[in-house]
Amino acid sequence: MVTAVLRELAGPYPLLPFIQEPWFLREPLGRHLTTAWEQTSRRVAHEGTAEELHATRDDYEIVLLGYLKILSGYLTLMSRFGGEPQGEIVSHISLCLEQLQKHYDALFPRWQTLDDLQMMLRERTPHPAELLRAVINNSQPPQNWQDSGGTRTPTD
């Protein structure tokens, strides 16, 4: 069963890109899946709904492993039987395979439990000190400091 979070991560039907358009085997597939992970994990971290994402862990792992196997199989076939005109497609599939393997390797060896996922989400979320520095670096000095020509007065 495809849950709402798995649909967010992999689309309404995990193999739909292959059914609709075989060109999706190229780089857009890797970009699509990694972008979906970035957006979903950012949303989950913001909303505090890690349990919802963790519930899809095994299904999401199967989706990624399936894509890795399909891409690897296509790459093997294209390399063996595709001939020279297919060289660009082979390089796109190789890039996509590499991108998805990095994505998989960054997630699943570390993500076994809900606590693991929560720790990974915290690592991706800026710490309060970093947020404060960002606000300070992007804010304007107080108006009374600007009016004094940039020099601080004892009342500042």
Image (cartoon, rainbow, N blue to C red):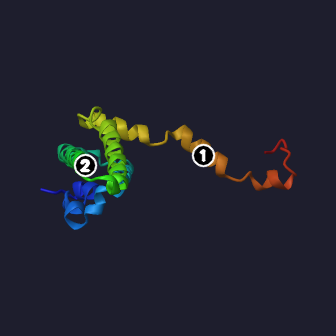
Q: Between 56 and 15, which is closer to the camera in this rendering?
A: 15
Farthest residue to the left: give it.
Answer: 1
Report the disc number at residue 154.
Answer: none
Q: Between 58 and 44, which is closer to the camera in this rendering?
A: 58
Of tags 2 and 1, the one toward the viewer is 2
- Residue 91 placed where, x, y %? 37, 49
Say which quadrant the N terminus sits in: bottom left
Q: Quadrant of residue 2?
A: bottom left
Say which quadrant the C terminus sits in: top right
- Residue 31 placed where, x, y %? 37, 54
- Give the distance between the C-alpha atoms of the residues marked 2 and 1, in whole angstroms: 41 Å
Farthest residue to the bottom: give it.
Answer: 20
Check disc 2 and report the residue beneath it: 71
- Residue 89 placed where, x, y %? 34, 55
Position of 94 compared to 73: left or right? right
Report the disc number at residue 134.
Answer: 1
Position of 115 compared to 143: left or right? left
| Residue 37 seen from this side | no
Q: Amino acid at mark 1?
A: Ala
Position of 136 compared to 13: left or right? right
- Residue 39 placed where, x, y %? 37, 54
Q: Residues within 10 Å of mark 1 (few under 14, many from 20)?
A: few
Q: What is the total number of numbered labels drawn onto the structure image?
A: 2
- Contact flag, marks 2 and 1 (Cβ < 8 Å): no
Above or below for 97 versus 4: above
Q: Residues within 10 Å of mark 2 (few under 14, many from 20)?
A: many
Q: Earlier in the sequence, mark 2 or mark 1?
A: 2
| Residue 132 seen from this side | yes
Q: Secondary structure at mark 2?
A: helix
Q: Amino acid at mark 2?
A: Leu
Taking the spot 32% from the left edge, 55% from the top edge, the residue there is 86
Q: Secondary structure at mark 1?
A: helix
